[in-house]
Image: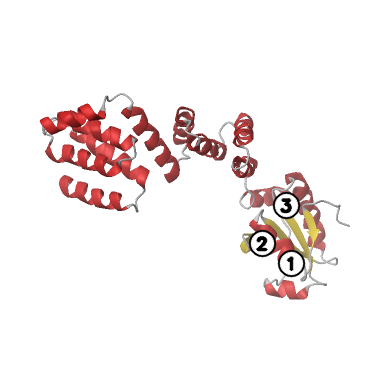
């Protein structure tokens, strides 16, 4: 008899929708098609159950007795048993037939079941909507236990960035870059932080605007103004001023102006109308 566990269920056609398909939208479900007379099933089943208890909720094991539920076996195209399917978001994502040694089964599960730090980071992300302080504490605890966790770093950086704690978010994003864990959203956050940092040292925008109006060749004033505008989310003005520097400066400010435009593109995203417009203009200037 299967040892009782919240992570191991005996399912049938009546309960399959809830036990497997709906449950798999929250956590991966491993479906074990077996029968009492099947020798390999009696070898594989206890290992699956052991791992389900050991993983403690990282996946659910749903056992289907094919003698009792031939329609379910037919629906999955089962021709031999044991047949094991991994279900995520209501769809099979992997499968195998026959017994498998525990070492190989563990390796197979690693491709199905999120790592512990990923699972806990997702739980902390959900918690952040109700209790940001508790979510931050949970994420820092994950990083203490898993120092190289990109999932916990990314989630914590997002939480801190959303709270306006840019100085705290920046080192996490830089560490992510070193770990190869940056994605488009992380690039956007880091670009935004660098825009904010640069703008703090550039002076009074009114004075810069007056300098630029008085001397259209004061490209240092134009670039500084563009940096401040970008930090203030005045992206159209920032891109236009930076473009003017790229187009007309013949000194050392052309490349910093181009780099500023690229950072703004990262913040806005590739599909933003300003990105599309000014990337086209920049390309025409450079090529």
Q: Nearer the viewer, mark 2 or mark 1?
A: 1
Is 269 displayed left or right of 213 in the figure?
right
**Residue pointed to by mark 1:** 16
State whether residue 98 appears in this view.
Answer: no
Q: Residues within 10 Å of mark 2 (few under 14, many from 20)?
A: few
Q: Nearer the viewer, mark 3 or mark 2?
A: 2
Is 73 displayed left or right of 213 in the figure?
right
Q: Residues within 10 Å of mark 1 (few under 14, many from 20)?
A: some
**Residue pointed to by mark 2:** 96
Marks 2 and 1 in Cβ contact (< 8 Å): no
Q: Which quadrant holds residue 9?
A: bottom right
Q: Secondary structure at mark 3?
A: loop
Q: Answer with mark 3 or mark 2, whichever residue precedes in sequence.
A: 2
Which numbered dot is residue 101?
A: 3
What residue appears at the point 36 percent right and 31 percent down from the top-left corner?
Answer: 196
Q: Answer with mark 3 or mark 1, whichever residue precedes in sequence.
A: 1
Q: Nearer the viewer, residue 169 or 40?
A: 169
State whether residue 36 appears in this view.
Answer: yes
Q: Nearer the viewer, residue 32 or 154?
A: 154
Q: Secondary structure at mark 2?
A: strand
Q: CA distance from mark 2 to mark 1?
A: 20 Å
What residue appears at the point 79 percent right and 61 percent down from the top-left corner?
Answer: 41
Q: CA distance from mark 3 to mark 2?
A: 13 Å
Q: How far across and down, in percent of the image, does residue 215 sit?
A: 10, 30
Which numbered dot is residue 95?
A: none
Q: Residues within 10 Å of mark 3 (few under 14, many from 20)?
A: few
Q: How far across and down, in percent of the image, does residue 82 sit?
A: 75, 64
Q: How far across and down, in percent of the image, does residue 90 sit?
A: 63, 63
């Amino acid at each position: 008899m299967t040892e009782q566990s919240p992570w191991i269920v005996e399912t049938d056609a009546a309960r399959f929708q809830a036990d497997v398909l709906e449950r798999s939208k929250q956590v991966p479900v491993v479906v074990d098609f077996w029968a009492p007379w099947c020798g390999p099933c009696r070898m594989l089943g206890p290992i699956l159950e052991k791992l389900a208890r050991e993983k403690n909720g990282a996946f659910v094991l749903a056992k289907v007795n094919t003698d009792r539920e031939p329609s379910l076996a037919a629906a999955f195209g089962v021709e031999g048993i044991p047949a094991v399917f991994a279900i995520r978001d209501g769809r099979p994502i992997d499968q195998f037939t026959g017994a498998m040694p525990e070492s190989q089964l563990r390796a197979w599960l690693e491709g199905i079941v999120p790592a512990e730090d990923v699972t806990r980071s997702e739980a902390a992300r959900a918690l952040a909507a109700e209790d940001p302080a508790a979510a931050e504490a949970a994420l820092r605890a994950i990083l203490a236990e898993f120092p190289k966790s990109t999932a916990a770093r990314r989630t914590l950086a997002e939480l801190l960035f959303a709270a306006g704690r840019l100085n705290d978010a920046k080192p996490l994003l830089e560490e992510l870059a070193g770990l190869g864990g940056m994605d488009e959203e992380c690039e956007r956050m880091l670009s935004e932080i660098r825009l904010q940092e640069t703008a703090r040292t550039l002076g009074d925008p009114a004075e810069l605007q007056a300098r630029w109006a008085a001397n259209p060749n004061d490209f240092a004033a134009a670039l500084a103004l563009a940096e401040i505008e970008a930090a203030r989310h005045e992206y159209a003005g920032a891109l236009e001023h930076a473009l003017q520097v790229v187009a007309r400066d013949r000194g050392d400010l052309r490349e910093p102006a181009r780099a500023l435009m690229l950072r703004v593109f990262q913040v806005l995203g590739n599909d933003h109308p300003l990105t599309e417009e000014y990337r086209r203009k920049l390309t025409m200037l450079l090529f």
